[in-house]
Amino acid sequence: MILPTNFTKLTVAEQTFVITDLERVDRGLPPFVGLTASLDSVSETASKLRVDPSLASSLMRLLGVDAWGSIWAGDLGPLASDYDWMYNDGYSSSGSVNI
């Protein structure tokens, strides 16, 4: 994975966004266009409360979302979280982070 030269200057949310898009493009999926302020706010609030975010049905309709899910990581930053989500996820008797 080749990170942009300004990666360390990005916020955690921006770093997570960049890494997610790099993973998507690497797998032939289209990149996301950008962050969404409404979803950013919901995610930030949930992370501070240490819970999964929940979306109001009105927000889901506004965004054209039929279904969604969240992914949680309590790692040392966006790169470690990406590693767990992409490469260390799921049950494994040899050391997955999932219980």
Image: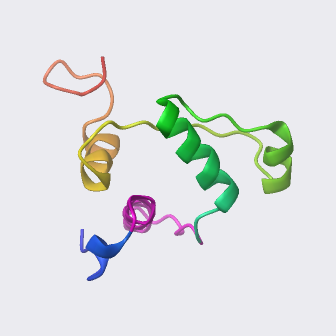
Does the magenta stretch mainly form a helix, a strand or a loop?
helix
Q: How is the image coloured?
A: rainbow
Taking the magenta stretch, the answer to whether it contains residue 24 is yes
In this view, which residue lies farthest toward the bottom? 5
Quick one: 16 or 9, which is closer to the camera? 9
Locate residue 67 relative to residue 49 in the image: left or right. right
Q: Is residue 80 above or below residue 94?
A: below
State the image quarter where residue 97 is shown: top left
Q: Is residue 29 above or below residue 57?
A: below
Residue 91 figure quarter: top left
Whole-percent x, y for residue 11 in the image: 40, 65
Which residue corresponds to the image point at 76% horizontal and 48% vertical from the top-left?
A: 65
| Residue 27 percent coordinates (x, y) | 40, 61
Asked if residue 34 is positioned above or below residue 42 in the image, the reply reads below
Task: Please name the residue shown 24% across and 48% down the image.
Answer: 80
Whether residue 80 can be seen here: yes
Q: 80 or 42: nearer the eye?
A: 42
Which quadrant: the C terminus?
top left
Say which of 92 and 8 sits in front: 8
**Residue 37 drawn in magenta:** no
In the image, residue 81 lies at what x, y percent? Answer: 31, 46
Residue depicted at x 25% and y 37%: 88
Q: Does 2 sit left or right of 24 as displayed?
A: left
Range covered by the magenta-colored residues: 11-33
Q: Residue 6: x and y, percent?
A: 30, 80
Give the residue at x 48% y 38%.
Answer: 48
**Compared with residue 96, is residue 24 higher up or lower down, i.e. above or below?**
below
Numbered label tally: 0
Residue 70 appearing in the image: no
- The foreground one among 82 and 43 is 43
Quadrant where the N terminus is found in the figure: bottom left
